[in-house]
Structures are given as C-alpha cells and as structure tokens.
Amino acid sequence: MIIGVPKEIKNEEYRVSAPPMAVEVLTRAGHEVLVQSTAGEGSGFTDEEYIKAGATIVSTAEEAFGRADMIYKVKEPMPSEYPLLRRKQILFTYLHLAAAEELTHRLMDSGVIAIAYETVELPDGSLPLLTPMSEIAGRVAIQVAAQYLGRMYKGCGK
C-alpha cells in the first residue's frame, strides 16, 4: 500500500501524523510512504530523518494525495484538500464530523473511505486513539487555565 503523509495546513496545527519511527515500521512492513516535504518540521523532524527511515519525499500535497492509497493525517481535510480526495482512497485522521456538516458531505461525495481516529473502538468499548488525546487535553487545560489566571492576562493570579 502507498501511504501519503501530507503537511498539515490547519491553522496552528504543527503535528505530523507519522514520525520517522512510524515510517520505518510501515516501510519494513512493505508499504511505500510518501511524506510531503517539511511535513515534520513543526514536530521537529527533518526530511532527512524521513528519508533515512525509508520515506520518499514529495514536494506537494497534490502528489501525496494523488499517488497514495491511504492518506494519513492528524486533522480533518481543509477545503483546499477536498478536491484531492478520491473514490476508494482511505483517509485516516481525526474528523469530528458531528460539528462539520460540509466536510461530511464532501467526504461522502468524494467516495473516500474515511476512518476517524475518534471512532476506532476496541471490543471492550474503549477508544484507544481518542483516550490519549483526551488525557493530554485534560492536563494541558490546567496549565492554560493557570496561565490565564496570571497577571499578564489580568487574571486574579499573582
């Protein structure tokens, strides 16, 4: 399978879906991984690290989407990416469709096979891809709240 890892373009999103270690695991399993140039920079990974892990670097999102059987992202596709999705291509990412009617319709119209991380469920009902993100969000919420309570933001903190 050819797996495409495009650079995230959502505002303030700096993560990458596949660090070099994941690319190495995927390529060892026989998959070809296309990583868009600079896709990992926001997470501290260089193109050279991806090449060393076995990825092929592509220059554009269009090339990653166009050649890949599966698109592996962090966040939902942005409107500029909708036309890049195609019938029977797999999209694996966070989607949060309950709050995204337009995206839902675009995914249906494209014929893409969309798998949302937040809906992957184990037989016991647990959500293995959502639980870690929820735990991180809970811990970060305390830090953010403390920051806004500080003097810099005119909170009541000292």
Image: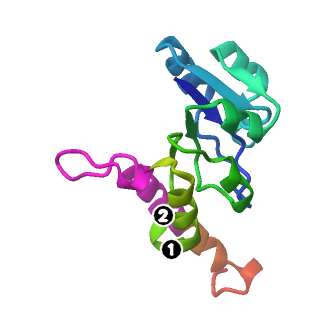
Q: Residues within 10 Å of mark 2 (few under 14, many from 20)?
A: some
Residue on which the image places disc 1: 99
Relative depth, front residue between 104 and 98:
104
Q: Which quarter of the figure has residue 148?
A: bottom right
Percent position (x, y) of residue 78?
A: 68, 59
State the residue at coordinates (67%, 30%).
67
Relative depth, front residue between 50 and 108:
108
Question: Does residue 84 lie above or below 64 as drawn?
Answer: below
> In the rendered structure, are the residues bearing label 1 and label 2 in contact, judged by CB atoms less than 8 Å apart?
yes
* Image side of residue 97 versus residue 150, left or right: left
Amino acid, disc 2: His
Residue on which the image places disc 2: 96
Can you name the residue that lies furthest to the left here? 124
* Image side of residue 90 versus residue 63, left or right: left
Q: Which mark is residue 156?
A: none
State the residue at coordinates (67%, 26%).
34
Percent position (x, y) of residue 43?
A: 69, 40
Question: Does residue 90 lie above or below 33 as drawn?
Answer: below
Amino acid, disc 1: Ala
Element at badge 1?
Answer: helix
Compute the Cα span from label 1 to label 2. Answer: 6 Å
Write the start and end of the magenta stretch as one range.
Answer: 115-142
Q: Which quarter of the figure has residue 53?
A: top right
Percent position (x, y) of residue 151?
A: 73, 81
Percent position (x, y) of residue 8?
A: 70, 48
Q: Does the magenta-highlighted stretch encompass residue 139?
A: yes
State the residue at coordinates (56%, 18%).
24
Can you name the residue that lies furthest to the right here? 59
State the residue at coordinates (67%, 80%).
158
State the count of labels. 2
